Image (spheres, rainbow, N blue to C red):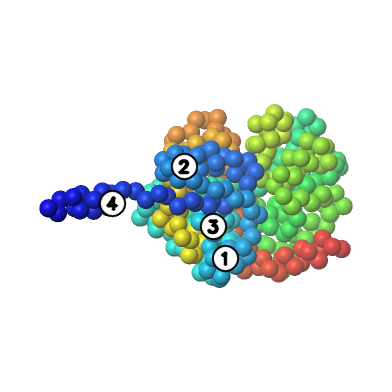
Amino acid sequence: MKLKPLMIAIAAAVALPAMAQLTVVNFGGANGAAQKKAYVEPFEKASGGKVTMVEYNGEQAKIKAMVEAKKVSWDVVEVESPDVNRGCDEGLFEKMDWSKLAPKADFQPAAVHECGVGTFVWSTVMAYNADKLKTAPTTWADFWDTKKFPGKRGMRKGPRYNLEFALMADGVAPADVYKVLATKDGADRAFKKMTELKPNIQFWEAGAQPPQFLVAGDVAMTTAYNGRIDAAQREGKNLAITWTGGIYDLDFWVMPKGTPNKDAAMKFIAMASSASEQSEYAKLISYGPTNNKALAKLDAKVLGLLPTSPANSKTALQFNIKFWADQGEALEKRFAAWAAQ
């Protein structure tokens, strides 16, 4: 009788294989902690698998080395917007199967990419210590005004964001910043404005540094990632954000080309892109969801802290990936020479 082998075959067909261990790579810090709670732990519970979290600093070279050696050990990686474009062009990432995610129309248009899915919206903003600065700065011109607001200024070491802020401080409207910066005169104008502030600049290179500078009183105000200030506020620090002229951008989930766990990686990304999971993430750190349906699940208090809220985004500028892809290398070199002078 063949019934027994048939039953065994059916059982084998429906049995779920033990899920391969998944490695998820992100930038750590408050963001990594929020991802662990909102995405990793629910995924482990739902899948019965194990997720290993790895922290990195955005080094695309590590992904490239793995892909070229055909020894890929990372399955899902969070990358910044310029890197999703560059990595896609270089063939470093698997193509994103959007049929396994929510409909594209559910997402912010900027989050939809052939090689990735935008996972959150974050902003580089102006921040200050409200215990030490009684009058709130309200514009980038205030950031440059060391007579009215004496003290050092924290700025990320590099041209990105700083050149845009310099032009806004010099009176350029946010909508015109990249049009001006794309010209030789505009770039000269931005560097001239940076030179005005140079004696008062204290550079930072890691996202954790700006809130530390503010708490220690090393700087009067600083540029910062809004999520880092949010994390410090949750720890009881009286730090504040000025949203005027903030620059927002997205981070993306990608899968390195050749990941051995592509199916599981896709399932993780799908779960982390759902409205329910993204709304949980936004409650843990003030980064805006890319799935628009997540917004309906958030209360007014949480919405008011997000870069995507109407009040916070009305004068915001979207980071221009194409501009920085075209002109970034030349501006990086110019900035390095300027900073070394």
Residue 309 visible to an observer of this rendering: no
Sooner in the amino-acid sequence: mark 4 or mark 2:
4
In the figure, residue 68 lies in which quadrant?
Answer: bottom right
Q: Which mark is residue 66?
A: 1
- Residue 20 is at least partly visible in this image: yes
| Mark 2: few/some/many CA within 10 Å (<14, 14-19, 20+) | some
Residue that badge 2 annotates: 44
Task: Determine the CA span between mark 4 and mark 3.
Answer: 29 Å
Which residue position holds label 4? 12
Q: Which mark is residue 74?
A: 3
x and y percentages locating residue 229 in the rendered image: 68, 38
Q: Does residue 287 lie above or below 320 as drawn?
A: above
Q: CB of mark 2 within 8 Å of CB of mark 1?
A: no
Q: Image quarter for residue 2? A: bottom left
Tell me the SS state at disc 1: helix
Q: Secondary structure at mark 4?
A: helix
Q: x, y (%) of residue 84?
A: 54, 61
Point out the tag, 1 or 4, that comes first from the N-terminus: 4
Residue situated furthest left in the rendering:
1
Height in image: 173 above or below 300? below
